[in-house]
Image: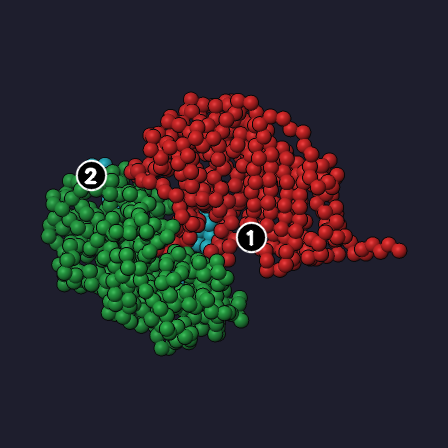
Chain colours: A red, B cyan, C green
């Protein structure tokens, strides 16, 4: 006599260890939530892996997401999980195509939250025009995780003629940012206990392949692409400067910062250059293309505040900034996270 | 020491007997104690440090300083 | 932002710099006392605008830098106690104690939380009735009122699980100590604007008269600092030693009496150790008897801590202005922001950190 599990998925308020055990509950979770929502020919096969037809130069990237809180103004961990890897592929010069999705869930995560995150992943993947083709789920004991950790890995093809590498950054290039900085990091802080505040600041999490498409339509002669996530614009540019051996000089008055982000940074004593972004692109390319690129990117909803914020000059690595008052100072790599100052 | 920033009072309220204000810093609102700026009213600028208002900003003095700057700049 | 951007105007800065160039005739050693002033000088690289006759020396005005090693070790010991939530401002989390720092303890499982205001710490105590919440109350006179308010609030809410570990310091005794040093070369001071917003500046008038040294009280925006320097150089060139208030939009002569009243009720004067410098008499605040139930040092057993400073660190001399960070053997080698030996390399406007990042 066959006994089937009588309790449907939606009777569970929270994720339990059994949901990761490999048995009927795991099967239910995969079919009734993941495959049902993320639905595509690869996932529907429920094979151990996805078999993909790809030809050309393949870019491959991976990223893990551990953000706390899971839900923040402007999005949740699901948005970051898709857009983060999509944008890493964009920064390789690739057209993102396929993602894997690995979940490590802490026992006790509310099923409603998991459902919301999966629906967000579904929508983010649709917007980014990528498919989630394979995945894995584990459940760990309470106390051994932090609600949910997500890993996404992704692949995409790099079109002919595109070579993106920090070493290509060279004298005479300009540095463009596609919009206002520090929105994501400040949005996260706004809901953190002990330092929270009210504002309309939202995370800027977004896929940047649309912007990249516009860019490559104008020119393939793009030297560096980078999404300035943790550590902000300052850290990203310091890394690029070190790899290329060239110096970068920023112009403070050209750097777009929204009024509210500016206000939050003043109260906390933060420098927006060091704060995370999740939907902005640094583009380093020869100056001759800058005018056209800016003109076209500014027509895209994600690029309306795009600006040239600096130039590459001098065979001596390091990032400097011309301040609002006309003096120049060094913009160093930060060690550790920026902490709110009293002083 | 003493990172303190000017913000404008948008409303005044009491939190279990503690005098508080919602203060806007370029649109970001924080609850700030106005325990020692008894005369503060909506529309005043206060200088906020670690969740408390140090003083009410003297707008007349601020304007005077800016006027001095204007004179120096036009020399 | 209103009342900020106007003081960052490039034309104003250039005009003030030109005036300073015109009036300076001889070399002057000037100390800016406040960490916030140091931060602004570094952030806007104001040295670029100053004639080489002006030698700016960074003073001990960073409460993070001067918090004694013993207090840091006490905070670390508290964080390791079961059922204690250690709450503090952000910038003290990375300051090294004898063995560890608060961030490291957090990574080892201690419940260490960061707040913007001590009133947030009271809220944490309210929300966690079965835990003991200790707020690491550092700061100068600017922060003393709100630290006091947190205790008054806790008392009003009948909380028996809120405590403060007080490491509060006062500016005038430190200035007096610096001016009494045998090898002191400081000829004029930029006085801290936000401290004076609370205390007023009568004590600085007394110091100016006693030591025949001019003080100018300034704000923290680049125009405020340059205007302050212009006025100070004029005083020095004229041989005047008085106190000038160049932050009138915030500072009045007698300060904020309501705030001072609360400070005097909740705290009392005490001798305080300044890290790297030593004990300066009557330079600190401790919780008064009336509120002793909120004093962490009375409630918890914090004896027997093995406190020892790095032998290489010369933070004390740097904070007193008798050495520059570049004089230190460990600067840039054993001591860098990633692994600091002393507090001035940790705090963003500590002199060593500022030198390392910006020069």
Residue C310 percent across, percent down from the top left: 31, 59
Q: In the image shown, does A218 or C144 lie closer to the viewer?
A: A218
Q: In the image shown, does A1 or C266 lie closer to the viewer?
A: A1
Q: How far apart are marks 1 and 2 (CA)?
A: 50 Å
Name the residue beneath numbered marker 1.
A69
Q: Is residue C14 above or below residue A298?
A: below
Q: Quadrant of residue A145?
A: bottom right
Q: In the image shown, does A187 or A162 lie closer to the viewer?
A: A162
Secondary structure found at label 2: helix
Mark 2: give few (<14), some (14-19) or many (20+) Cα within 10 Å. Answer: some
Image point 27% across, 61% down: which residue?
A: C276
Residue C216 percent across, percent down from the top left: 21, 53
Image point 67% across, 29% down: which residue?
A: A53
Image point 63% across, 48% down: which residue?
A: A103
**Residue sitting at the far right:** A1
* Eye-nearest disc, 1 or 2: 1
Asked whether residue C89 is in view, the answer is: no
Subunit that carries the residue with mark 2: C
Name the residue beneath numbered marker 2.
C18
Subunit that carries the residue with mark 1: A
Q: Is residue A340 above or below residue A168?
A: below
Residue A137 percent across, percent down from the top left: 66, 49
- Quadrant housing the C terminus of chain C: top left
Answer with left or right where residue A147 lies relative to residue A34: left
Secondary structure found at label 1: loop
Image point 19% across, 47% down: which residue?
A: C55
- Quadrant housing the N terminus of chain C: top left
Residue C352 percent across, percent down from the top left: 29, 51
Answer with left or right where residue A140 lies relative to residue C83: right
Asked whether residue A46 is in view, the answer is: yes
């Amino acid at each position: 006599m066959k006994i089937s599990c009588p309790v449907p998925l939606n009777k569970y308020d929270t994720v339990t260890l059994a949901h990761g055990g490999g048995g009927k509950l795991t099967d239910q979770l995969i079919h009734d939530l993941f495959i049902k929502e993320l639905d595509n020919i690869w996932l529907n096969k429920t094979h151990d892996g996805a078999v993909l037809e790809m030809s050309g130069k393949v870019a491959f990237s991976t990223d893990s997401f551990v953000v706390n809180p899971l839900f923040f103004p402007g999005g949740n961990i699901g948005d970051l999980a898709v857009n983060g890897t999509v944008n890493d592929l964009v920064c390789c010069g690739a057209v993102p195509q396929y993602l894997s999705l690995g979940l490590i869930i802490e026992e006790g995560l509310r099923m409603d939250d998991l459902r919301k995150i999966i629906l967000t992943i579904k929508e983010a993947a649709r917007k980014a025009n990528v498919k989630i083709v394979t995945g894995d789920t584990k459940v760990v004991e309470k106390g051994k995780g932090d609600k949910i950790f997500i890993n996404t890995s992704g692949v995409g093809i790099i079109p002919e003629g595109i070579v993106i590498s920090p070493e290509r950054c060279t004298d005479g290039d300009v540095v463009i940012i596609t919009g206002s900085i520090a929105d994501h990091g400040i949005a996260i802080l706004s809901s953190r206990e002990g330092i929270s505040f009210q504002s309309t600041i939202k995370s800027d999490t977004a896929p940047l392949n649309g912007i990249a498409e516009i860019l490559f339509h104008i020119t393939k002669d793009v030297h560096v692409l980078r999404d300035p996530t943790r550590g902000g614009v300052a850290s990203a540019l310091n890394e690029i400067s070190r790899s290329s051996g060239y110096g970068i000089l920023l112009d403070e008055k050209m750097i777009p910062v929204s009024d509210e982000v500016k206000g939050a940074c003043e109260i906390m004593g933060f420098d927006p250059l060091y704060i995370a972004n999740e939907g902005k692109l640094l583009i380093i390319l020869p100056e001759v293309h800058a005018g056209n690129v800016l003109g076209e990117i500014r027509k895209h909803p994600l690029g309306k505040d795009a600006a040239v914020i600096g130039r590459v000059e001098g065979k001596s690595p390091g990032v400097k900034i011309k301040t609002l008052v006309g003096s120049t100072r060094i913009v160093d790599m930060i060690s550790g996270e920026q902490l709110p100052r009293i002083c | 020491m003493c990172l303190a920033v000017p913000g404008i009072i948008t409303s005044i309220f009491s939190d279990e007997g503690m005098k508080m204000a919602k203060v806007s810093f370029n649109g970001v609102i924080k609850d700030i104690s106005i325990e020692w700026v008894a005369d503060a009213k909506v529309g005043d600028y206060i200088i906020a440090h670690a969740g408390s208002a140090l003083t009410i900003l003297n707008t007349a003095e601020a304007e005077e300083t800016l006027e001095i700057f204007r004179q120096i700049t036009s020399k | 932002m209103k009342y900020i951007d106007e003081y960052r105007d490039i034309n104003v800065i250039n005009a003030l710099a030109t005036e300073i160039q015109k009036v300076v005739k001889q070399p002057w050693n000037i100390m800016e006392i406040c960490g916030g002033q140091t931060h602004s000088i570094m952030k806007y690289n104001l040295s670029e605008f100053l004639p080489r006759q002006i030698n700016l020396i960074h003073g001990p005005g960073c409460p993070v830098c001067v918090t004694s090693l013993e207090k840091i070790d006490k905070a670390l010991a508290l964080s390791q106690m079961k059922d204690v939530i250690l709450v503090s401002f952000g910038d003290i989390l990375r300051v090294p104690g004898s063995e560890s720092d608060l961030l490291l303890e957090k990574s080892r499982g201690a419940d260490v939380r960061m707040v913007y205001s001590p009133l947030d710490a009271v809220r944490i105590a309210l929300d966690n009735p079965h835990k003991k919440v200790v707020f690491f109350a550092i700061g100068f006179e600017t922060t003393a009122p709100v630290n006091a308010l947190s205790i008054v609030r806790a008392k009003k809410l009948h909380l028996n699980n809120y405590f403060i570990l007080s490491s509060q310091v006062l500016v005038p005794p430190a200035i007096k100590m610096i001016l009494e040093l045998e090898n002191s070369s400081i000829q004029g001071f930029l006085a801290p604007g936000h401290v004076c917003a609370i205390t007023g500046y009568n004590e600085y008038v007394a110091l100016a008269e006693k030591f025949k040294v001019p003080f100018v009280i300034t704000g923290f925006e680049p125009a405020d600092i340059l205007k302050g320097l212009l006025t100070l150089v004029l005083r020095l060139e004229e041989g005047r030693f008085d106190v000038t208030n160049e932050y009138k939009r915030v500072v009045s002569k007698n300060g904020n009496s309501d705030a001072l009243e609360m400070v005097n009720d909740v705290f009392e004067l005490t001798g305080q150790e300044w890290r790297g410098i030593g004990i300066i008499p009557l330079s600190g605040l401790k919780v008064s008897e009336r509120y002793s139930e909120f004093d962490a040092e009375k409630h918890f057993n914090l004896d027997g801590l093995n406190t020892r400073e790095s032998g290489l660190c010369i933070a004390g001399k740097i904070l007193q202005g008798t050495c520059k960070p570049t004089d230190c053997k460990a600067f840039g080698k054993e001591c860098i922001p990633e692994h600091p030996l002393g507090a001035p390399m940790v705090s963003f406007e500590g002199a060593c950190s500022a030198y390392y990042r910006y020069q």
